[in-house]
Image (tube, rainbow, N blue to C red):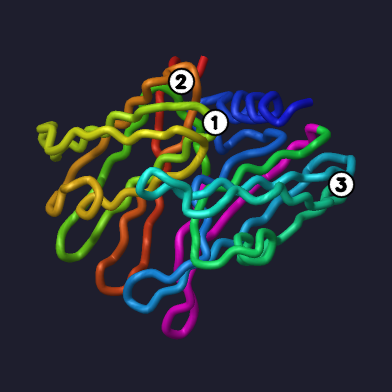
């Protein structure tokens, strides 16, 4: 089975309902993983757990896709990593970007699938040490197609918001991003392009040109409605660096 065929199988199974992350599948996507410093003295790293809930052993393949900045990938896509997981066992991959791929100071997106189709449960947390402990955000992948939406966005002196799009296909696509105020007014409309598979994370203020949004929502529309993608928002506390993650939601009819 080719990698493209397996990816199509994985995303199709993941899209088997409105709340895709609820259902077992032979793989999944973590739309953003990181190993890099952030604001307010933070340093973010991603831990991933993979549970093989089948009654057979499996080999799990991890593929890391680079962030795209300035139209170019921030690192070369590394070779896939394989992890053996026994029947009913769980693998915990701490700081996965550094320990499994040997990369530091970068972020990207992670695709995971079992070579024999064994169903997997995938969880991820991107976190930083803090005073007296740690804090961070759980990251989940929800497969959407054609259009996706994110609500409850804020950009002000207290919070800043990042919008992320992971395009998992090695072909061109353009996304139209419409930023709305709470009353529905379009504050900004812009295009985000891809020439290859990868992640683009865009600050609402720095990259999308919206320095103030007391409350609002975003619509993301793909030029390739038959192919799916992943999108998310991360709202960050300006003082502490603490972040809250929100996966985009799409329409059931766009997937099937």
What kind of element bears circle 3?
loop
Q: Quadrant of residue 92?
A: bottom right
Sequence-wise, which precedes: disc 3 or disc 1? 3
Q: Quadrant of residue 156?
A: bottom left
Q: Is residue 209 above or below residue 138?
A: above
Compute the Cα span from label 3 to label 2: 32 Å
Q: Where is residue 229 shown, x and y percent of the image? A: 47, 32
Q: Give the residues drawn in magenta, as a range.
A: 117-140
Q: Which residue is labeled 3 in the image?
A: 87
Report the front residue among 165 and 88: 165
Pointer 3 local density, CA inside 10 Å: few below 14, some 14–19, many at least 20: some
The residue at the point 22 percent across, 34 percent down is 190
What kind of element bears circle 1?
loop
Question: Residue at the bottom extreme?
Answer: 132
The residue at the point 32 percent across, 76 percent down is 40
Pointer 1 local density, CA inside 10 Å: few below 14, some 14–19, many at least 20: few
Q: Is residue 35 above or below residue 240?
A: above
Q: Which residue is labeled 1 in the image?
A: 170
Q: Which residue is labeled 2 in the image?
A: 252
Marks 1,2: beta carbons within 8 A = no
Question: Residue at the right extreme?
Answer: 56
Q: Can residue 203 be seen from the camera position used here? A: yes
Pointer 2 local density, CA inside 10 Å: few below 14, some 14–19, many at least 20: some
Q: Quadrant of the N terminus?
A: top right
What kind of element bears circle 2?
helix
Q: Can residue 214 be seen from the camera position used here? A: no
């Amino acid at each position: 089975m080719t990698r493209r065929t397996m990816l199509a199988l994985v995303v199709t199974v993941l899209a088997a309902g409105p709340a895709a992350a609820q259902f077992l599948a032979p793989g999944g996507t973590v739309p953003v993983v990181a190993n890099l410093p952030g604001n307010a003295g933070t340093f973010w790293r991603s831990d991933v757990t993979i549970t093989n809930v089948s009654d057979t052993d499996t080999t799990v393949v991890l593929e890391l896709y680079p962030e795209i900045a300035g139209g170019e990938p921030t690192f070369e896509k590394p070779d896939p990593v394989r992890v053996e997981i026994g029947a009913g066992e769980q693998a915990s991959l701490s700081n996965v970007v550094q320990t499994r791929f040997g990369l530091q100071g970068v972020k990207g997106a992670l695709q995971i699938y079992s070579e024999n189709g064994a169903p997997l449960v995938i969880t991820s947390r991107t976190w930083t040490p803090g005073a007296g402990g740690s804090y961070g955000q759980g990251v989940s992948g929800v497969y959407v197609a054609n259009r996706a939406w994110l609500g409850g966005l804020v950009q002000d002196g207290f919070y800043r918001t990042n919008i992320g799009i992971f395009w998992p296909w090695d072909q061109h696509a353009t996304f139209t991003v419409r930023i709305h105020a709470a009353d529905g007014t379009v504050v900004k409309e812009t295009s985000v392009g891809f020439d290859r598979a990868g992640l683009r994370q865009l600050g609402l203020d720095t990259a999308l040109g919206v320095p103030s949004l007391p409350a609002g929502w975003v619509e993301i529309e793909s030029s390739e409605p038959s192919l799916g993608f992943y999108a998310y928002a991360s709202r960050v506390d300006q003082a502490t660096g603490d972040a809250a993650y929100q996966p985009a939601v799409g329409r059931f009819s766009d997937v099937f």
